[in-house]
Image (cartoon, rainbow, N blue to C red):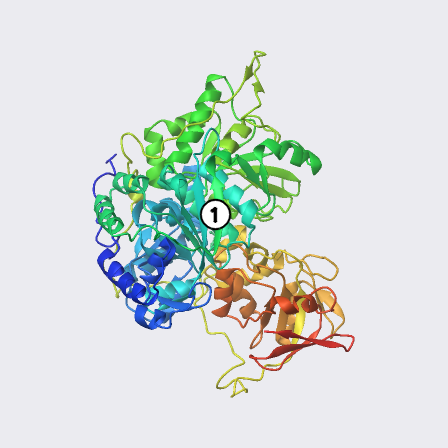
C-alpha cells in the first residue's frame, strides 16, 4: 500500500530536548566567555556537568576530555550487542536502533540476493531481532536499507548528538547535528548512561561561497576537500561548514559531504540549520521536529556565533569545484575529471573500466537516483545502453519504493542497470564477482572508500570514487578517459551524442512513500525481559565476549601493575594500515559476531613488513624463522612472549570495526603494544578499550623508523608507563622512545 510518508511520525523520541540544551549552553557560556562554533554549541550542551567541565576555562578544543550524554545510538549488524549484553542491564538508557545492512551479498539482483542472504545469515538476524526485543531497541530488518540513510530519514534532527557503531555515522550531519562513529564499547557507554568520553575536537571551518553548477555535485566538493586535507587532515577535528554556499545545498547533498568527512579522519561534520533541512524533515514526516528546530534556531542554537575563531579555515568557492575522481586505493588521491584521462595514461593503465556502481550510504538518496535516471533517459533516447555492468543500490526501502513509483527504476533498468537490495552490498565486499578475479581492472563507484580488495576481494581491482552522475555517464562510454562535460559518444547512426548536465530532485513531487510494509521497523517500545537471546553453543557466527587476560592487577603476578614485561617486536609495518588491512571485511564479515573465527582473517592481512617489503610476513628471531603475522603471533602467545608492532601514521584508518582492535588483543598474551606515529581516532579508542597502546611522539619518530632496526625481533623494555621506551636493537645498540 503506497501511503505518502508525509503522515506524521511519532516525534516524541526524535525531537532533541532543545530547551534543556539551550539552558545548559547558557551555563557553558558563563565559563567560556567567547563566541562558540555550531559544533561547540551542540557538543558542549551535551556535556554531563558544564560547570565542572568548563569552570577551569582554558582552551578546551584539542585539550579537554569531555564527559558527554549522547541522545541516541544506531548499530549496524552485530556490533555492540555482545558488549551491551555483558552490561547486564534490562534496557538501553537511550533510544537505539539496530540495522541489518552489511551482510546482504550482491549476486544477481535485489529479490534473490535478499532471500539468499536472509537464509545464510538467519542465525545472526534472529540474534539481533531477539536482542532488540529484549532490550527495547528498534529493529530494521535486512532489506530495509543502509543504516545512515535510515537514520537521516527517521532519527536525525538538528542539534542532536548521537553515536553510531559505524565510521560513516557522520552522514546524519546533513541535518545539522553531530553524529559520531564509535566502536561497540563506546556505544555501550551511551546505552548504559555511562558518560561517554571524547577529547574535545578542534573545529575546522569550511567557508562555502559561490554556487555549484553543471556537473558538479556535493560529492565533488568532499572528493576535492579530501584531496586537500588528506586522510589525516581532519583527525581530532570537526568540520564545520558555513557561508552562503550552504543554504543552496539539499539535505541529502549535505549528508554526502558529511559522510565522507570520515575519509579525512574527521570526528564528524556539521552545517547550520537551513530551509532545505526543514523541507526534508517535513517531507519525511517530521514536521514537529522542524517546528521545534525553528524555535531553537531563533534562539541561535543551530548556527555559529558571530566572530568565531576556527582552528583552521578553508575557503571553497563552489563555482570553482570541478567534478572529481579519487583513487585508486586511497580516498584522498584526487584528480579533476578534466585531467583524469591524462592521469590514467601517465600511470600506463588501460583506458577502460569493468563496472560502474551507484550506491553506498554516501550516494543512494532519492536525489542521487533521480539525477542518474535523468542521464539514463538521455542515453536511452539516443539508443544507448551502458557499456559495462551497472549496479544500482537504493539507500532504503523508502528510496526504492519512491523511485519505483516515479519511474526512475524503470529508466535505470531500460539502459541495463541491475538494481540491488537496499543494503551496503559491494561497498563492503558483499559482492559475488567471479569475472576479473586476479586480473588488474578498474571500477568506478559512487562509494566513499576504495581500499585494496575491499569491494571484490581482488587486490588488483582499482576502485575510483566519483559522483553517481559521473559514474553513470562514464558507464555509457566504458572508458576512463571519457569526460562527459566535453566528450561525445558516437552512435551506430554515425551521429554523436553528448550528455546534458543532469538534474535530480531531492524531494519527490508526490512525497515519499514508505514502500513495502515488511521492511518497516519493529518498534519494541518496551523491553521484554522474558525474551531469550539465542546463541547456540556451537555457533560459528556468534560468540559471547570473554574478558581478556591482563598483565595488570590482581592475579597477574604483577600486583603493582607498573612493571611491564619485555616485548618482542613482531614487525614494523610499512605505510598505510587501515582497518581493512588489519581485519578484512568481505567474506569475513559474516564472522563479525564471532571473535575467534573472525580473528582467522588475520591470515589475509595486507600489512606490509617494512623490512623486506613483503605482505603478511613476520619473523621469529628466537627460532630464526618467518611465517605469516598470525602464525608468528600465535607462536609468541604459545611461548608466553608479549609482543609489539611498530606502525606508521594514521594507524587504523577507516572503519569503526572494532574487531580490528579486538583481534590483536585476542592473539596476544597478557599485554601487547602498538607503537604508532599516529592513530585514527575511532581505532585508537577501540584499542584503548581492548589492548595497551602507546605511541612515540613525533620527536622520536626517526628513531622508530628507518635508521634504527626496530623491526623483527627487537627487544623492547618499558621502564614504566610514564617514562620512555627503551628499545634494544638486535645488534646490541639501544635507543629510547618517549611515550
Ligand atoms: O565494517 C564495519 O563493521 C563497519 C565499517 C563499514 O561500514 C565500512 O564502511 O568499512 N565502518 O565504516 O565502520
Ligand atoms: S561505507 Fe559502505 S559498508 Fe560502510 S556503512 Fe556505508 S554503505 Fe555500508
Query: Does 455 sit left or right of 98 as displayed?
Result: right
Query: Splitting the image into 4 quarters, where does residue 535 fall?
Result: bottom left
Asked if 642 appears above or below 76 in the picture, the reply is below
- Count the numbered circles shown: 1
> Is residue 455 in view from this perspective?
no
Q: What percent of the width, then of the height, locates residue 145?
A: 38, 44
Q: Where does the image place residue 687, in percent across and percent down from the top left? A: 51, 67
In the displayed structure, 60 sits above or below 513; it is below
Q: Nearer the viewer, residue 98 or 21?
A: 21
- Quarter of the image with the C terminus in it: bottom right
Q: What x and y, as percent, mark residue 93?
A: 29, 65
Of residues 673 and 639, the one nearer the viewer is: 673
Residue annotated with mark 1:
260
Residue 7 appears in the rendering: yes
Q: Residue at x 21, y 53 (%)?
A: 12
Residue 436 position in % (x across, y down) = 62, 39
Which quadrant of the figure contains the N terminus? top left
Q: Residue at x 47, y 44 (%)?
A: 425
Locate residue 315 relative to residue 638 in the image: left or right.
left
Q: Is mark 1 within 8 Å of ligand 2?
A: no
Q: Residues within 10 Å of mark 1 (few under 14, many from 20)?
A: many
Q: Check disc 1 and report its element: helix, strand or loop.
A: helix
Amino acid at each position: 500500500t503506497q501511503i505518502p510518508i508525509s503522515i506524521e511520525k511519532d516525534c516524541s523520541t526524535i525531537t532533541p530536548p532543545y530547551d534543556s540544551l539551550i539552558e545548559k549552553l547558557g551555563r557553558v557560556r558563563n565559563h567560556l566567555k567567547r563566541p562558540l562554533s555550531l559544533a561547540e554549541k551542540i557538543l558542549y550542551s551535551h556535556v554531563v556537568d558544564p560547570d565542572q567541565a568548563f569552570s577551569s576555562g582554558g582552551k578546551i578544543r584539542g585539550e579537554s576530555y569531555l564527559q558527554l550524554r549522547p541522545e541516541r545510538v544506531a548499530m549496524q549488524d552485530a556490533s555492540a550487542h555482545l558488549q551491551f549484553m555483558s552490561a547486564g542491564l534490562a534496557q538501553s538508557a537511550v533510544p537505539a536502533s539496530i540495522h541489518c545492512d552489511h551482510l546482504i551479498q550482491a549476486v544477481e539482483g535485489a529479490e534473490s540476493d535478499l532471500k539468499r542472504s536472509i537464509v545464510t545469515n538467519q542465525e545472526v538476524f534472529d540474534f539481533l531481532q531477539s536482542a532488540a526485543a529484549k532490550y527495547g531497541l528498534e529493529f530494521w530488518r535486512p532489506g530495509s536499507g543502509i543504516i545512515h540513510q535510515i537514520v537521516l530519514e527517521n532519527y536525525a534532527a538538528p542539534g542532536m548528538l548521537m553515536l553510531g557503531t559505524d565510521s560513516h555515522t557522520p552522514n546524519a550531519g546533513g541535518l545539522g547535528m553531530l553524529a559520531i562513529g564509535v566502536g561497540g564499547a563506546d556505544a555501550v557507554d551511551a546505552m548504559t548512561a555511562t558518560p561517554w568520553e571524547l577529547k574535545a575536537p578542534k573545529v575546522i571551518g569550511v567557508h562555502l561561497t559561490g554556487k555549484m553548477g553543471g556537473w558538479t555535485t556535493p560529492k565533488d566538493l568532499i572528493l576535492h576537500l579530501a584531496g586537500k586535507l588528506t586522510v589525516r587532515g581532519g583527525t581530532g577535528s570537526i568540520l564545520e561548514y558555513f557561508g552562503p554556499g550552504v543554504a543552496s545545498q539539499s539535505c541529502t547533498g549535505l549528508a554526502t559531504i558529511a559522510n565522507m568527512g570520515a575519509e579525512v579522519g574527521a570526528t564528524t561534520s556539521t552545517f547550520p540549520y537551513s530551509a532545505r533541512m526543514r523541507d526534508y524533515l517535513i517531507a519525511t514526516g517530521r514536521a514537529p521536529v522542524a517546528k521545534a528546530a525553528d524555535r531553537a534556531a531563533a534562539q541561535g542554537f543551530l548556527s555559529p556565533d558571530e566572530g568565531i575563531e576556527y582552528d583552521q579555515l578553508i575557503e571553497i568557492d563552489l563555482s570553482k569545484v570541478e567534478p572529481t575522481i579519487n583513487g585508486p586505493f586511497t580516498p584522498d588521491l584526487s584528480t579533476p575529471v578534466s585531467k583524469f584521462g591524462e592521469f590514467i595514461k601517465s600511470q600506463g593503465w588501460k583506458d577502460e573500466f569493468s563496472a560502474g556502481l551507484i550506491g553506498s550510504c554516501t550516494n543512494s538518496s532519492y536525489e542521487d537516483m533521480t539525477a542518474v535516471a535523468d542521464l539514463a533517459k538521455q542515453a536511452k533516447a539516443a539508443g544507448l545502453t551502458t557499456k559495462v555492468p551497472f549496479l544500482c543500490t537504493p539507500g532504503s526501502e523508502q528510496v526504492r519504493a519512491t523511485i519505483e513509483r516515479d519511474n526512475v527504476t524503470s529508466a535505470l533498468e531500460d539502459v541495463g542497470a541491475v538494481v540491488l537490495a537496499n543494503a551496503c552490498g559491494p561497498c563492503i565486499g558483499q559482492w559475488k564477482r567471479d569475472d576479473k578475479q586476479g586480473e588488474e581492472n578498474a571500477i568506478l563507484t559512487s562509494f566513499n572508500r576504495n581500499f585494496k580488495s575491499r569491494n571484490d576481494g581482488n587486490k588488483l581491482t582499482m576502485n575510483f570514487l566519483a559522483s553517481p552522475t559521473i559514474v553513470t555517464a562514464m558507464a555509457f562510454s566504458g572508458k576512463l578517459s571519457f569526460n562527459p562535460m566535453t566528450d561525445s559518444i558516437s552512435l551506430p547512426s554515425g551521429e554523436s551524442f553528448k550528455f546534458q548536465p543532469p538534474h535530480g530532485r531531492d524531494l519527490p513531487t508526490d512525497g515519499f512513500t514508505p514502500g513495502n510494509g515488511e521492511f518497516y521497523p519493529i518498534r519494541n517500545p518496551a523491553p521484554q525481559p522474558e525474551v531469550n537471546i539465542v546463541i547456540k553453543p556451537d555457533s560459528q557466527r556468534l560468540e559471547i565476549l570473554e574478558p581478556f587476560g591482563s598483565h595488570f592487577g590482581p592475579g597477574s603476578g604483577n600486583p603493582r601493575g607498573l612493571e611491564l614485561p619485555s616485548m618482542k617486536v613482531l614487525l614494523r609495518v610499512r605505510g598505510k594500515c587501515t582497518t581493512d588491512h588489519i581485519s578484512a571485511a568481505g567474506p569475513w564479515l559474516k564472522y563479525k559476531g564471532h571473535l575467534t573465527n573472525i580473528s582467522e582473517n588475520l591470515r589475509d592481512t595486507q600489512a606490509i613488513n617494512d623490512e623486506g617489503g613483503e605482505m603478511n610476513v613476520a619473523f621469529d628471531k628466537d627460532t630464526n624463522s618467518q611465517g605469516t603475522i598470525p602464525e608468528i603471533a600465535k607462536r609468541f602467545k604459545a611461548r608466553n612472549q608479549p609482543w609489539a608492532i611498530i606502525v606508521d601514521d594514521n594507524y587504523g584508518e577507516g572503519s569503526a570495526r572494532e574487531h580490528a582492535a579486538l583481534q590483536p588483543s585476542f592473539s596476544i598474551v597478557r599485554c601487547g603494544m602498538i607503537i604508532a606515529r599516529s592513530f585514527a581516532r575511532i581505532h585508537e579508542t577501540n584499542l584503548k578499550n581492548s589492548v595497551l597502546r602507546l605511541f612515540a611522539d613525533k620527536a622520536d619518530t626517526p628513531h622508530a623508523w628507518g635508521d634504527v632496526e626496530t623491526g623483527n625481533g627487537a627487544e623492547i623494555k618499558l621502564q614504566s608507563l610514564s617514562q620512555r621506551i627503551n628499545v634494544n636493537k638486535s645488534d646490541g645498540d639501544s635507543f629510547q622512545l618517549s611515550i
